[in-house]
Each structure stands twice: as C-alpha cells, then as structure tokens.
Amino acid sequence: MKFEAYLEDSISQKRFVNLQYFTDIHEFMSISCIITGMINKESVTYLSTNTGEEVLLDKVIKIDEFYAPSYAHIDDFTCDC
C-alpha cells in the first residue's frame, strides 16, 4: 500500500495513527491521533485531526510506517534526544 492510499483509508476507517510531521518552524512532532479529514485553504492542503491540529500535508513525514513521497528517502527518522 502507498502513502496516499493509507492516508485515505485511515481517514475513512477513523483509525488511530502515529503522525510525524514538521511544524512551520521545522520542529519535529509525533502525535497519536485520528485524521478526521483533509482541508484546502488557499490552495494548500491540511490534515485535520481529532486533537485539533491542522497539519500541512507537505510537512507530513510519515503516517504509521508509510513515508510521504517527499520523505521516502529517509530510512529512519527518530530523535535521539
């Protein structure tokens, strides 16, 4: 399954997922949530979540084990903090 298909399936199934993304200030975030839908604002797509976040789709790194196409080259994106 590809990222796009998994995203659509997660929305339709209302599945809890682990969503990893960068904020506008390039801060790495990892949250567990239900992606409730996709919103278009001024020709930009956001993911809305049950936790209230609206995440810019272009800033999504991965959903569960599925990497977004722009981050597919990353084998492991973890924080050693």
Image (tube, rainbow, N blue to C red):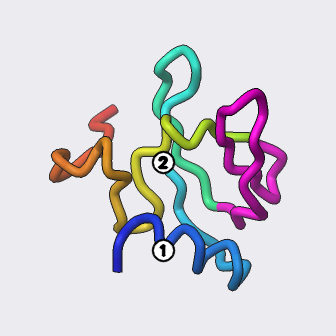
Coordinates of residue 60 in the picture (x, y in percent): 48, 44
Question: Residue flagged by tag 1: what amino acid is it?
Answer: Tyr
**What residue is drawn where x is 16% and y is 52%?**
75
- Helix, strand or loop for disc 1: helix
Q: Is residue 16 left or right of residue 52?
A: left
**What residue is drawn where x is 34% and y is 80%?**
1
Rendered position, 18 above or below 13: above
Q: In this view, does 15 lie to the left or right of 26?
A: right
Quarter occupied by the C terminus: top left
Rendered position, 23 above or below 47: above
Q: Name the residue under label 1.
A: 6
Q: Quadrant of residue 46?
A: top right
- Helix, strand or loop for disc 2: strand
Where residue 29 is drawn, which disc sits there?
Answer: none
Q: Is residue 14 left or right of residue 69?
A: right
Question: Residue flagged by tag 2: what amino acid is it?
Answer: Gln
Most extreme residue toward the bottom is 13
The residue mark sitting in front, 1 or 2, is: 1
Q: Are marks 1 and 2 in contact (CB under 8 Å)?
A: no
Q: Residues within 10 Å of mark 1 (few under 14, many from 20)?
A: some
Q: Mark 2 points at which residue?
A: 20
Let me know if residue 36 is in the magenta part. Answer: yes
The range drawn in magenta is: 33-53
Most extreme residue toward the top is 25
Coordinates of residue 47 in the picture (x, y in percent): 68, 49
Give the mark, 1 or 2, whose residue is nearer the N terminus. 1
Q: Distance between the residues labelled 1 and 2?
A: 14 Å
Coordinates of residue 4 in the picture (x, y in percent): 46, 65
